[in-house]
Image (cartoon, rainbow, N blue to C red):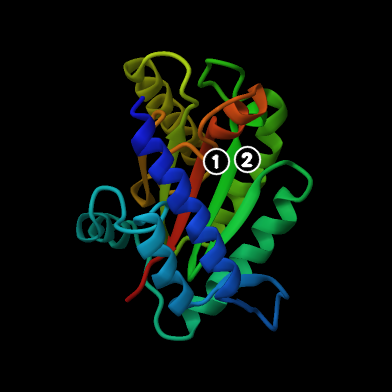
Amino acid sequence: MNMTKGKKLTVGVMAASLLATTACTTNPETGNRRISQTGLGAVLGAAGGYLVGDLLGGRNSRTEQIIGAGIGGLAGAAVGRYMDQQEAELRRETAGTGVDVIRQGDDLILRMPSGITFAYNRYDIQPQFQSTLNEVASTLAQYNQSYIDIYGHTDSSGSDAYNQTLSERRAESVASYLASRGVVRARMATRGFGESQLLVNPEVSEADRAANRRVEIKVVPLRQ
């Protein structure tokens, strides 16, 4: 892996975290802290759009598919309320499971460590995690006015090609499982990042490598 690139990413994510901490507001209904729109812009500038930015596969083509599936969009203040309610449900369902729910503006990120999602070097979902993913799927299916991007990530051990393929298969495995539990497939897109977006770099311990092996689900509201 290009260590210079990895170090730059790590610095960018650290800078973004500091900016996010100073640019948060507290939701009066849920009590959860979230990044304000102003703060979100600063985070994007510092981190180069990590976990934020354009939807996979393009917004227009996916919107057509979603509308074709009979799902309408949100408008105005309804967007924030809708995502607040969905966030509260997902936090409740994933509490104590090791899954992190991250709020970025009106978007949600579910970060799922592979240690609870997949066995080492595998992409089939572990049986003990299926009950949690079932709950997540139920909420995503209920709150269907959104796009869903699923990202796969690996650590830096192994070849780039192997890690890229593994990350793609893990993202697709999660998407397929969610679809089998009632989440409309037209809402979902997947991408594998391999080892290109490490959370911890350099990796000096197994804990560091484990932190980098993950799948993230990004939920973006569908606007009118």
- Residue at the spot x=65%, y=27% of the render? 115
Residue 57 seen in this snapshot: yes
Residue type at numbered disc 1? Arg
Nearer to the camera, 114 or 61: 114
Q: Is residue 193 visible?
A: no
Q: Specify whether 154 is left or right of 88.
A: left
Task: Write down the residue under mark 1.
Answer: 181
Residue drawn at (27%, 61%), measured in percent from left and top?
63
Q: Are marks 1 and 2 in contact (CB under 8 Å)?
A: yes
Which mark, by number, is residue 133? Answer: 2
- The quadrant in which residue 212 appears is top right
Query: In terms of depth relative to the viewer, which is nearer, 76 or 114?
Result: 114
Could you tell which of marks 1 and 2 lies nearer the N-terminus? 2
Work out whether 186 lies above or below 102: above
Above or below for 114 versus 221: above
Mark 1 or 2, which is nearer the eye? 2
Q: Badge 1 local density, few (<14 within 10 Å), some, or many (20+)? A: some
Question: Which of the numbered marks, if any, corresponds to residue 110?
Answer: none
User: Looking at the rendering, in which quadrant would you find the N terminus?
Assistant: top left
Task: Assign a secondary structure to mark 2.
Answer: helix
- Residue at horizontal 34 percent and vertical 55 percent from the top: 48
Q: Amino acid at mark 2?
A: Leu
Residue 30 against residue 154 in the figure, above or below: below
The number of numbered discs placed on residues in the rendered structure image is 2
Along the line of sight, which residue is nearer the eye, 2 or 96?
A: 2
Percent of width and height locating residue 120:
59, 16
Q: Is residue 25 left or right of residue 191?
A: right
Which residue occupies the foreground of this view, 26 or 145? Answer: 26
Q: Residue 108's spot in the image, x, y percent?
A: 52, 60
Element on which disc 1 rests = loop
Task: Place residue 194 in its image quadrant.
Answer: top left
Residue 57, position in %: x, y? 24, 48
